[in-house]
Image: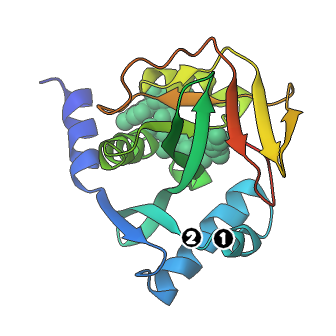
């Protein structure tokens, strides 16, 4: 093993990952997530967390400090004319700005990807600059058109982008077909 690999492995060993549902989260954990994500996304993350009561968070700690975070929500998605899928919809992927490019974000996402293996599919809306990063983690760009279903109406969302992660339950999901998601009271994707 060369020095760089050894250094990376040591870093990875110091990184502790915890998966916790929103109902089991301590107040301290919730405050850490809100502080990190409000800083990274430059908004009041508490507002978004309150809109989604049933979340599962993955928390990544080094030196007892929250360095990285992501969460998933259960969300119904439909690919083409197929059945409704129970997807794990991933949000809030963030690493503290001072601690990036150390492998924390990738390690946390790999952990999350194992944790969502019982879902029919993983899905998220990537920042344009992060598409390659997600691809390296095994995510695939959705190529077909995107729609949101709201009160029986079908709304096209051509300006959005979605990536999906195939779980052992996914079977063949054709990413060139249309993808529909149920409406929610904030960003459609
Ligand atoms: C996207 C984000 C979560 C990545 O977090 P991170 O902890 O820096 O992720 P990683 O360290 O695993 O990977 C980042 C880069 O460092 C590289 N890297 C990983 N381990 C490394 C190490 N030990 N040494 C040097 N570089 C390393 C990765 O290859 C990757 O390179 P790339 O940018 O060319 O793909 C972080 O940049 C972030 O919070 N961005 C702002 C919010 C955001 O865009 N979230 C996603 C919205 S969809």
Q: Residue 180: x percent and y percent?
A: 70, 34
Report x, y in % for residue 70.
51, 54
Which mark is first along the chain, 2 or 1? 2
Query: Who's the residue at 28% across and 47% down the image?
Result: 11
Q: Split into 4 quadrants, where in the image is the C terminus? A: top right
Q: Decide: few, some or many residues near mark 1? Use Cα within 10 Å; few <14, some 14-19, many ≥20.
A: some
Question: From mark 1 to mark 2, how far is it between C-alphas?
Answer: 10 Å
Viewed as shown, does residue 26 lie left or right of 123? left
Quadrant of residue 110 within the rendered picture: top left
Give whichever of 67, 143 is nearer the camera. 143
Tag 2's secondary structure? helix
The answer to which of 101 and 159 lies nearer the viewer is: 159
For label 1, being within 8 Å of ligand 1 is answered no
Tell me if 108 is positioned left or right of 162 in this view: left
Looking at the image, do the residues carrying marks 1 and 2 touch, with CB atoms under 8 Å apart?
yes
Q: Residue at x 83, y 46 (%)?
A: 152
Q: Which mark is residue 120?
A: none
List the residue tagged with mark 1: 49
Instruction: Reply above or below: 23 against 180.
Output: below
Q: Residue furthest top?
A: 176
Residue 130 lies, with reference to residue 54, above or below; the image says above
Depth order, front residue of 106/103: 106
Residue under label 2, please give it: 33
Q: In the image, is residue 65 above or below residue 105?
A: below
Name the residue furthest bottom.
27
Task: Please give the name of the residue rendered at 30% of the width and 56% of the height, measured from the top-left corner.
Answer: 15
Does mark 2's beta carbon lie closer than 8 Å to ligand 1? no
Task: Give percent across and percent down for residue 122.
Answer: 48, 38
| Label 2, residues with CA under 10 Å away: few <14, some 14-19, many ≥20 | many
The image's colouring method is rainbow
Q: Is residue 101 among what the camera can see?
A: no
How many marks can you see?
2
């Amino acid at each position: 093993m060369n020095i760089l690999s050894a250094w990376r492995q040591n870093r990875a060993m110091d990184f502790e990952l915890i998966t916790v549902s929103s109902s089991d989260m301590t107040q301290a954990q919730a405050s850490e997530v809100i502080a990190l994500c409000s800083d990274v996304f430059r908004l009041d993350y508490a507002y978004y967390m309150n809109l989604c009561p049933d979340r599962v968070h993955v928390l990544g700690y080094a030196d007892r400090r929250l360095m990285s975070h992501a969460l998933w929500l259960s969300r119904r998605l439909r690919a083409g004319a197929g059945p409704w899928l129970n997807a794990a919809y991933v949000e809030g992927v963030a690493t503290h700005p001072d601690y990036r490019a150390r492998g924390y974000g990738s390690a946390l996402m790999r952990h999350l990807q194992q944790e969502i293996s019982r879902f029919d599919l993983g899905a998220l809306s990537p920042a344009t600059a992060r598409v390659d990063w997600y691809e390296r983690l095994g995510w695939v760009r959705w190529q077909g058109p995107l729609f949101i279903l709201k009160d029986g109406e079908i709304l096209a969302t051509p300006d959005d982008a979605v990536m999906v992660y195939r779980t052992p339950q996914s079977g063949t999901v054709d990413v060139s077909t249309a993808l529909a998601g149920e409406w929610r009271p904030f960003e459609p994707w």
